[in-house]
Image (spheres, grey):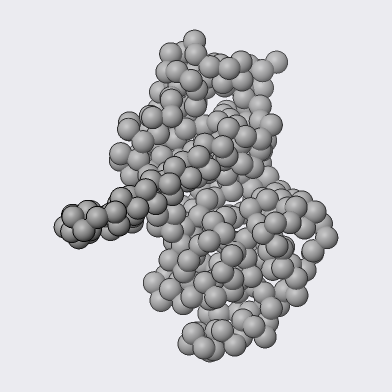
Amino acid sequence: MKLAIDAMGGDNAPDVNVEGAVQVLSKMNFLKKLFLVGDESTLKKQCDAAGIGSDSRVEIVHAPEVVGMDESGLAAVRQKKNSSMSISVDIVKKGEADAVVSAGNTGAAVAASTIKLRLLEGVERAGIISPLPSVHGYVLVSDTGANPDAKPSHLVGYAVMSALMARYVYNRQQPNVAVMSNGTEDCKGSEFSLKTYALLRALADKGLLPFNFTGNCEGHDLFETELDVAVTDGFTGNILLKSVEATAHAYTNWIKSGIMSSTLAKMGALCMRSVFRSLKARMSADAIGGCPLMGVNGVSIIAHGSANATAILNACRMAAGMVQNNVNDRIIETMSAINPVLREMEA
């Protein structure tokens, strides 16, 4: 297993990426090579200070440019060909690494991975899968931002890719998959969601889907039911994701404010300290690590900008899980059986 980390990507780069690399090398014993991409002199100093400078598995790859978090993703990929993000993806493209992890600019990560790696055979559009904590572990929502102007057939691809991710990485043997809508009845939804529903139902009736298609789902189903995958377009999915993140952040602040409001509340909080720790761990984005960009011919994991070292470790673990379980090969195989029928249905 060989991984590349965009060491200059993220709000706290390169510190957290080097700290994450220390954890990766310590806990992923099967790793043969870890490429750290960024300013060579800076990374060499930090790696030496962290005690991994002489590790034979570490290779520093010099990249003189950095993509800023506020830059246009596509423009940055075109104009900064020597950025740490672009060179990290190039390493995967050349087959020198199995996967890339970046906590940098999401738009640039999507653009670089899609343009350089291209799409898997049989996949129309790449989509970001975002795992959200739910009643049984995680529900995978896709797409959450890669493709805002999707077609119903794109969502069929997202459903297949997410379901295979749920099966082989999250160990859900028969994933339950649904279409995001404003009601669970099969007559509910926009024209777009109704067409998506119809395609998935027809494919399910023909026995071509590698999952259990449960129909439509609403927002509360993401957290309260045995749902493994929810599919939607990237515009809706991105709004959903950011709303959930903002709600969790707001509730955390409200709870903290309430605890600090009185001595009695502080005493009660001390008694519930273990509960709060458990809740924080379950809701933490760092525990997930990152979101895979599914559908590209390689493995690309996009960590959040404020990722810490633990997030980098878990993003690398997710990447390893996808590579070890041959998720991309399974996507190609499944889509090759579905696409001919899908094209007939759309004709």
The answer to whether residue 210 shows anywhere in this view is: no
The answer to whether residue 145 shows anywhere in this view is: yes
At 66% across and 38% down in the image, what residue appears? 147
Q: Residue furthest right?
A: 79
Task: Where is residue 302? Give x, y as percent.
Answer: 57, 55
Q: Residue furthest top?
A: 187
Q: In the image shown, does 191 or 93 lie closer to the viewer? A: 191
Task: Where is residue 278? Give x, y as percent.
Answer: 27, 55
At 64% across and 70% down in the image, what residue appears? 8
Q: Quadrant of residue 167?
A: top left
For residue 210, side relative to residue 14 (left or right): left
At 61% across and 86% down in the image, what residue appears? 44
Question: Compared with residue 230, is residue 10 higher up or lower down, i.e. above or below?
Answer: below
Q: If the image is split into quadrants, where does the C terminus sit?
A: top right
Task: Where is residue 100? Give x, y as percent.
Answer: 59, 61
Question: Compared with residue 37, is residue 53 higher up or lower down, i.e. above or below?
Answer: below
For residue 236, side relative to residue 140 (left or right): right
